[in-house]
Image (tube, helix red, strand yellow):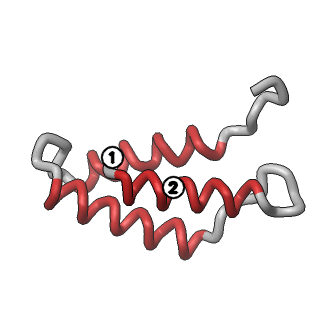
């Protein structure tokens, strides 16, 4: 994952954490936009990563699902 992609995911995470509700979902439109950008960058800029959009989507969703998991208070 590139620095720009990491920054985008960090912005989504920060937005989610800044909400008044704990574990509030991120804006679905912004998440979809970032998802599409990631698919394009994975399939064009990083040939070592899967070029198949479905496989890239699976990787992205796994990353997002991990980021959306509730945090344990000790972390």
> Residue furthest toward the top?
74
Label of residue 46 in the image: none
Q: Identify the residue at image location x=24%, y=65%.
A: 40
Q: CA distance from mark 2 to mark 1?
A: 10 Å
Q: Residues within 10 Å of mark 2 (few under 14, many from 20)?
A: some
Q: Circle 2 — which element?
A: helix
Q: Look at the picture and state if 10 lies above or below 33.
A: above
| Whether residue 7 is situated above or below residue 68 in the rendered picture | below
Residue 75 quadrant: top right
Q: Is residue 52 left or right of residue 18?
A: left
**Residue drawn at (59%, 43%) of the image:** 67
Q: What x and y, as percent, mark residue 45?
A: 16, 57
**Which residue is the site of mark 1?**
1
Residue 1: percent from left, percent from top: 33, 46
Secondary element under disc 1, as helix, strand or loop, is loop
Write the residue at 51% across / 55% down: 9
Residue ranking furthest to the right:
20
Left or right relative to 13: residue 17:
right
Residue 41 image point, x, y percent: 24, 61
The answer to the question of whether label 2 and label 1 lie on touching residues, with beta carbons closer than 8 A, is yes
């Amino acid at each position: 994952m590139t620095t720009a992609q990491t920054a985008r995911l960090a912005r989504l995470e920060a937005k989610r954490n800044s909400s008044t509700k704990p574990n509030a979902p991120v804006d679905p439109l912004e998440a979809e936009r970032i998802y599409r950008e990631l698919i394009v960058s994975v399939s064009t800029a990083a040939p070592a990563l899967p070029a198949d959009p479905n496989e890239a989507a699976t990787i992205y969703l796994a990353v997002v699902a991990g980021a959306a998991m509730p945090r344990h208070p000790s972390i």
